Image: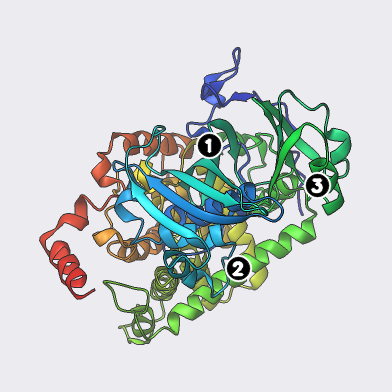
Amino acid sequence: MSAMYSFCRNLPPYDFSTGKPEPGHNSKTAPVEAFMTQDISLLNTVIGPVMRGPSSSHSAAPYMIGRTVRELALGPGERLKSVVIRFDPSGSFAEVYSNQGSDEGFAAGLAGVAITSEAYRQALQRACRGEDFEFAIRIGPLDRNDHPNRVDLHVCVTGIHAQERTDVFEGVSLGGGTFLVTHLNGQHINVDGAAYTLIAEHEVAATGDLLPYLEGAQVAEQHALNGMTLYALTVAPSVRMLADLRGLAGLRRVRLASPTQEVVHNRERTLLGASELLQRVAADADLADFAMAYECARLGLDLAAVQQRFDERVQLMAASVEAGLAKEDSAGMKYLRPTARRFSHTPLPEPLETSFLKTAIAGALAAMEETTSRGVVCAAPTAGSAGIVPGCLHALRVLGASEHALSDSLKVMALIGALFAVRGSYAAETGGCSVETGTSAAMAAAGITHYFGGTPAQILAAASICLMNTLGLICDPVGGEVEIPCHARNIAGVGHAWSASTAALGGFDAVIPFDELVEQTVKVGNMMHPDLRCTARGGCATTPSALRLVAVKNLGA
C-alpha cells in the first residue's frame, strides 16, 4: 500500500431511536438513511451479498431474514412446525413476492438450505407440500408498516416433548440484500446479520452478569431489554459455553443466530461522505489503497485476507458472466429469451465490433440473465443492477487488464457505492431505479476512471455525472419480474459508466458534488408515487404492450 489511513476517529454518535445525531452534534453528519450507514462493509453491503437472483431486496434479504429467524427460533431438539409470512397489501412484497422469488428466499432460509446449494430451488416446493414444515403467505395489514419491504413471520416451533411455542418476528429488507430482524415478540432487537447474535431470555428479572460465561466470544455490544439481554459477538460461542448458559437458573431460553455475511468488528462511523474523503486523501491518492484500509478496519482482517475476498468477488462476477454467455435456453426467465450469447456473436461494423461497449453490454446481459435465472451472482450493489459492474470488469479484462488491476478497480467501485450508502439506500422500493442502476453506473464509472489513472477528484466527477443523469429514474418491472426494463437499463448503465469516465478523464466538471447528488437522489425518490417504486403499477409495466405480454404469459402458465 502506498499510503496509510487511520479509521479510529471520534465521530458524533447517532441515536437510532430518533433518527438524528445525539444533542449537541451537527445534523449534517447524520446519514439520511440510518439503517444502512452505521457499519457499511464494502464486501457485505456494496459488492455483496453473494446470492441467487433475481432481486437483492426481494430474494437475498428474504433468504437472510428467513435463515436468521430459523436460528433464533430453534433451540436444541426443536423443529419448525409452521411459518406464516405476512405482507402488507400496500407494500412492495405483496405485489412482487412470487415473481421476484421472495417466497423461494424465505422458504430456503427457513429450511436452513445454503444459498449456493441446488436444493435452494426445491425448498419452496417442499415447504408448500409440508415436507419440512407448513408454510403459508398471507396478505393483510401489518401493525408496524413503516417501510415498503416490511414482513412479519409467525413461527410455530415443536419441542422435544411435542410442546409448541409461537414466536412473532418482524423484519425489513433495506435494499442491496441488507436487512434487519427488528422485533421478537414485540421487543426491539435489530439483528442485522453482521455478528453472532445471542439473546438470553430471563425468567423474571435479569439473571446477573453473563459476560463471564461469554469469555472468548468477544462481546462487541450488549443491550438490556425487557426480560432479555442481547449480545453481539464477533466470535462464535463454543458448544460448552452455550451449554453452560442454558444450564443457568433463571434463564428461560438462550437463542443464537450466526452472521449471514462477514462479521463486522468495527461499527464506528468512519466514512462520512465524498467531500470529507477528498479532504482526507492526497490529490493523487490511490483510492484502492484507501478502500483496502477501510475494509480491513471494518472487518478486523489483515490485508491478505481482504485481498483474497476481493479477488474472489472478481472471480465470481467473471463466472456469472461466463455462465450467462453460455446460456442457450430461457429457463428462469419469463418474458425475455437469452440475448447475451447471441449478441456477443453478432458481428457489428467497426469500430463497434471491437469496442469496450459491445463487450461490456454482452457481459452485463450475461450477468443479468444469470441472476434472472436464479443463478449465483454478486449484488453490485443490487441484483437488479448486477450486470453493470461485472460487464465493465469483463470489458476491461478483454482490453488486457490484469486480475490485480480488476481487483483494484472493484475496490474503488465498492468505495463509491459505500459513499452513496452513507446518505442513501439501495432499495428501489424507496428510491426507484436511480438508486440501483444509477448507483451501479456511478460505481462502474469510478472503477473505469481509476483503471485509466484518474485522480480521486476525477473518479468522483465520473460518479457524479452518473447520479446527475439518473435522478428520478423509476422502477417499473413488467409483470413484477426483473427483466423488462431491467436488462435494458443495465445496458444503459455500462454505456453511462464509460461515457462518464471518458468525460471526467477529459476534464469535464460535474459542478454538483457527489454528496449533494446522493441527497437529491433520496429526496426525489421520496417524491415519487409508490406506483413508480417497484410495484409494477406504473411506467413500462403499464404500457399496452407490457400488459398484453403479461396476460399472454399468465394465460399459458
> Which numbered marker is on residue 35?
1
**Which color scheme is applied?**
rainbow
> Which numbered marker is on residue 314?
2
For disc 3, the marked residue is 242
Badge 2 marks a residue whose secondary structure is helix
Q: Going 79% across and 48% down the picture, which residue do you hit? A: 235
Residue 505 screen position, x and y as percent: 48, 55
Q: For residue 408, which quarter of the picture?
A: bottom right
Q: Nearer the viewer, residue 225 or 350?
A: 225
Residue 483 screen position, x and y as percent: 32, 66
Looking at the image, residue 168 sits to the left or right of residue 261; the answer is left
Mark 1 / mark 2, whichever is N-terminal: 1
Q: Nearer the viewer, residue 557 or 153?
A: 153
Badge 1 marks a residue whose secondary structure is helix
Mark 2: few/some/many CA within 10 Å (<14, 14-19, 20+) = many
Instruction: Give the CA separation, mark 1 to mark 2.
Output: 27 Å
Mark 1 / mark 3, whichever is N-terminal: 1
**Residue 464 visible:** yes
- Closest to the camera, between mark 1 and mark 2, is 1
**Residue, far left:** 544
Mark 3: few/some/many CA within 10 Å (<14, 14-19, 20+) = some
| Residue type of the residue flagged with mark 2 | Val
